Image (cartoon, helix red, strand yellow):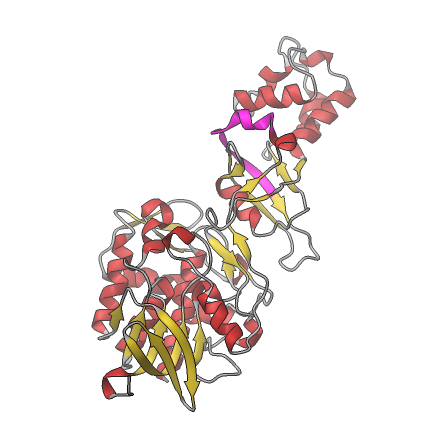
Amino acid sequence: MTKSAVDQWDAIVLGGGAAGLFCAGVAGQLGLKVLVLDHAQILGEKIRISGGGRCNFTNLHSSPHYFLSLNPNFAKSALARYSANDFINLVKRYQIAFHEKHQGQLFCDESAKDIIHLLVNECKQGKVRICHPVDIQSVSRTKDTWAVETSMGRQFGTALVLATGGLPVPAIGASAFSLEIAKQFDLAVTEIRPGLVPLSFTDDAFSSMSELSGLSLPVQISAGKKNSAYGSHLFNEDLLITHKGLSGPAVLQASNYWHEGESIQINWAYERDCHSEFLNEDNRLKVVEHHLAEMMPKKLADFFAAQLNFSGRKWTELAKKDRIALANLLNQWSVKPAGTLGWKKAEVMLGGVDTRELDSQSMMSKKHPNLYFIGECVDVTGHLGGHNFQWAWSSAYACARAMAS
């Protein structure tokens, strides 16, 4: 296909998810002629299924503190240029009802589709052309023009934006396309692995606890090592015991900091100083598991009593060393996961295009002018709770403003 005015764009955005659509909408409204290409039959599927179908679209407290990257300072510029309040104001302008659920997490009252409609409408206002499903066959560059070979013909753009996300949830079309393009143009990519993902255990380590499947309770959990790439972190969140291992917000958060071969530490009664309480308490009539049931679900109390063969024993029968052992079990429980449940269950991708390759103010490649990477494909990953959507909005906005300047 020959180059023509119809096929020449100021910017071609590859990926019609949160970052891609928002970037296109902002750039279009700033006067750029923008084309969005996506391989999906239905746009925004990851947005639609997020937050239980209600989309945790940002977090009131979103800041660089809540993000992981080999360069923890990289996200500062974009997050400062477009904050959570900026996106909240946009949501309010569209009269989308929302509520705060937990620790600043904001969800739509009705449906995640409200956010998809917002993004598509922003693109319409910017006269953005959105084409899908489209297969992207190759990307190349000639002088100052990017060429994208697609199933709808060759498209040319002054700028090219990679916004195709990461590898989580392959069932809805997740791919490593942005990372492949980065490597094609000799940009470094950091190690990638599933993030915000449940942890699994071997049968030997978990066989007795699997009987507690479905039980949920608040815990304090820590994972990671101080000298590792992302360091260590402590979370106070809800934990869920499943038939395969551990899940729930606490474990998803910890999974970002955990590496294979390491243990995680769980405080099952973090609001209690069990060492002090157990050594000073004298519940003459109560058996151990009944006493523990005052601070945790009965099934879990029975489980911990059985772990030390204390089931049915009266509290007063426990020697000092027994009480210390029980306190250690509750306040300092350590277990080594076998692995994660992988990309199918992960919510985000850790790692990605190395931030040393990108300008933090524009998201543009330092090696290749007018080549941009935004959203999940970049080595910036947020904690659970709306921070990853905020990174999508912030990185997209920085990119759009840079292209229009």
What is the total number of numbered labels drawn onto the structure image? 0
Q: Who's the residue at 50% across and 49% down the image? A: 196
Quadrant containing the N terminus is bottom left
Residue sitting nearer the eye, 32 or 58: 32
Q: In the displayed structure, does residue 350 sit left or right of residue 23?
A: right
Q: In the displayed structure, does residue 345 sit left or right of residue 93?
A: right
Is residue 296 shown to the viewer in this render? Answer: no
Is residue 84 shown to the viewer in this render? Answer: yes
Residue sitting nearer the eye, 30 or 133: 133
Q: In the displayed structure, does residue 115 sit left or right of residue 339?
A: left
Please state the horizontal and vertical placement of residue 144, each as a whole percent of the image: 41, 90
Residue 268 is one of the magenta-drawn residues: no
Q: For the magenta stretch, what is the residue range?
A: 207-221
Check the image and report above or below for 263 versus 324.
Answer: below
Check the image and report above or below for 339 versus 400.
Answer: above
Q: Who's the residue at 74% across and 26% down the image? A: 324
Please state the horizontal and vertical placement of residue 356, each as a whole percent of the image: 58, 74
Q: Who's the residue at 60% across and 25% down the image? A: 208
Check the image and report above or below for 8 versus 324.
Answer: below
Quadrant containing the C terminus is bottom left
Residue sitting nearer the eye, 366 or 54: 366
Please state the horizontal and vertical placement of residue 169, each as a whole percent of the image: 42, 52
Check the image and report above or below for 15 versus 361.
Answer: above
Toward the bottom, the furthest residue is 143
Q: Who's the residue at 69% across and 23% down the image? A: 278
Which corner quadrant of the image does residue 32 belong to?
A: bottom left
Please state the horizontal and vertical placement of residue 138, each as a whole percent of the image: 40, 75
Residue 210 is one of the magenta-drawn residues: yes
